[in-house]
Image (cartoon, helix red, strand yellow):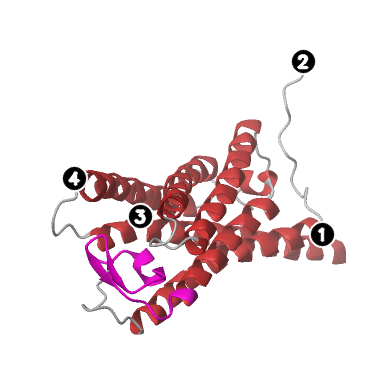
Amino acid sequence: MNAPRSIPDRAFDTRSTTKALFGAWSVISVLQIFLAEFVVSLAWAGRSAYSPIFNVISDLGAAHCGIYNGRSVCSPLNWVMNGSFVLQGLGMLLGGLLLSSTLLGVAAHFHGAEPPQLRAAHWVRGFLVVCGIGVMAVGIFPEDTIGPLHYLGAALFFVCGSIAQFLLWWIWYRRSWSSWILLLSGIVAVVATILFTVFSLWLDVPGFPGGLVERLIVYPVVIGFAVVGMTVARGVRAERKAQAAQASG
């Protein structure tokens, strides 16, 4: 039986690159979470000032004012934060659906991709979809409403996001410099996840900087996915220019 062949160069038409650009920009849109967090934190009305060191991001989406898990929470703009979570999840969901395994398998450089990379890229797309569903659940079910669904959504984002970035590092190794950003973000997110799980969830250590450690999980994953979107968008634009030059020549 013949071995599977790699994907040939110039295997993308205008329609597929348009779809890929939309998917890439959908993933890049996850960066809006930083603006939403900043704006919502300014309206904080808790008994104590909002602290990015001790308050987790989900506190900004809490539906009620009061004491939650030992923290004073009161976020008048909770609907903005929760809406931002839903939009972030939608961006990742669309990215997973619109970015093809072939495109991710070649790091948008349009050189032949081998079957192992293509199979791994297929898993990356699945993890993106799961991440998106998880973050949407975080926004739809604030921490002080249906807690189990909120935390399940957060866990899906943490775990699947980190795995996806490690896979992309392996796929893009020697294809794109952004692979090293993905490796670094994945390592930081995994280490922070372990610390948060052990010292905040299991041991409940007093004074543990849960907000800071949670951000060391969330921010690297968000930035890593944005880098993925930027890498794909840049590669697709370069391919379009190359195709236009070839057609005019």
Residue 75, quarter of the rendered image: bottom left
Residue 218, quarter of the rendered image: bottom left
| Disc nearer the start of the sequence (1/2) | 2
Give the image location of residue 36, x and y in percent.
Answer: 45, 76
Residue 203 is tagged as 4
Q: CA distance from mark 3 to mark 1?
A: 36 Å
Within 10 Å of the Cα at label 1, are there few (<14), some (14-19), or many (20+) other Cα atoms?
Answer: few
Q: CA distance from mark 3 to mark 2?
A: 45 Å
Looking at the image, is mark 3 or mark 4 nearer the viewer?
Answer: 4
Judged left or right of residue 115, residue 191 is: left
Within 10 Å of the Cα at label 2, are there few (<14), some (14-19), or many (20+) other Cα atoms?
Answer: few
Amino acid type, callout 2: Met
For the record, the magenta segment spans 54-79
Q: Please tell me whether residue 205 is drawn above or below residue 61 in the rendered image.
A: above
Q: CA distance from mark 4 to mark 1?
A: 53 Å
Disc 3 secondary structure class: helix
Amino acid type, callout 1: Arg
Residue wearing tag 2:
1
In the image, what residue occupies the spot 50% across and 72% down? 32
In the current view of this chain or complex, which residue is farthest to the left? Answer: 206
Residue 213, quarter of the rendered image: bottom left
Q: CA distance from mark 1 to mark 2?
A: 33 Å
Residue wearing tag 3:
217
Residue 15 is tagged as 1
Judged left or right of residue 87, residue 100 is: right
| Disc nearer the start of the sequence (3/2) | 2
Q: Check if residue 70 falls in the magenta segment.
A: yes
Amino acid type, callout 3: Ile
Disc 2 secondary structure class: loop
Disc 4 secondary structure class: loop
